Image: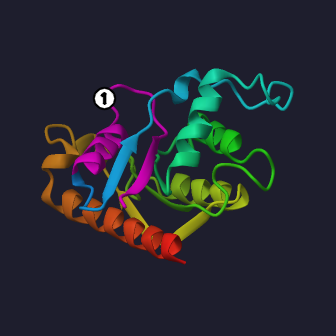
Amino acid sequence: MSVRILALVGSLRAGSHNRQLAEAAVKLAPEGAAVQLFEGLADIPFYNEDIDVEGSVPAAAARLRAAAAEADALLLFTPEYNGTIPAVLKNAIDWLSRPYGAGALTDKPVAVVGTAFGRYGGLWAQDEARKAVGIAGGRVLEDVKLSIPGSVTRFAETHPADDAEVVADLTEVIARLHGHTGEALAA
């Protein structure tokens, strides 16, 4: 059985370095694992309980929930916007947290990684994402981390998939997430 890992990217920009990292993760998935990059976070309306009604949940939100429900784990890629998590990623977490206590994130292993221009590689945003995911019911893997600083200069002429250090670190993250997920599925 293959472990299914759903990747969510907190940047909507076509040339996003975090998106490039997620694309690299799809290619680096070890045998027995598959990383699927979710497309469509931009189409999901801001969470509003008034529109989160069984039978009439917006299609984009329902698609996100279904993809997360089918996944065995999630891997979040986040840039840092003004020292915190991007709204599009927080919105996805909000949709996945409902219904309360039974959302698509409940008890799923989740790792958070990313790159940012600053010298800490988006560490604040990653910490905020971990906090939100934990409150939303996900099982945050606090020991599985990757913060890549200086994205604008580091990846100006090199795709993350062509950076040997990034490939090694990202491969390790996916392998560890895969391992945690395999343990959870076997239990």
Q: Give the residues in magenta.
A: 1-27
- Observer able to see residue 84: no
- Is 87 left, or right, of 163 in this rendering? right
For disc 1, the marked residue is 15
Q: Name the residue rendered at 57%, 35% in the picture.
A: 64
* Callout 1 amino acid: Gly
Q: Is residue 65 above or below residue 183?
A: above
Q: Nearer the viewer, residue 61 or 11?
A: 61
- Is 48 left, or right, of 119 in this rendering? right
Q: Name the residue rendered at 47%, 76% in the picture.
A: 183
Q: Is residue 25 above or below residue 146?
A: above
> In what quadrant of the picture does the N terminus appear?
bottom left
Q: Nearer the viewer, residue 105 or 77?
A: 105
Residue 17 on the magenta span: yes
Q: Nearer the viewer, residue 67 or 23?
A: 67
x and y, in percent, of residue 74 in the image: 49, 53
Residue reaching furthest to the right: 50
> Would you call the spot at circle 1 few (<14 residues within 10 Å), some (14-19), or many (20 or more)?
few
x and y, in percent, of residue 148 in the image: 33, 56
User: SS class of the residue under badge 1?
Assistant: loop
> In what quadrant of the picture does the C terminus appear?
bottom right
- Is 67 left, or right, of 149 in this rendering? right
x and y, in percent, of residue 88 in the image: 58, 34
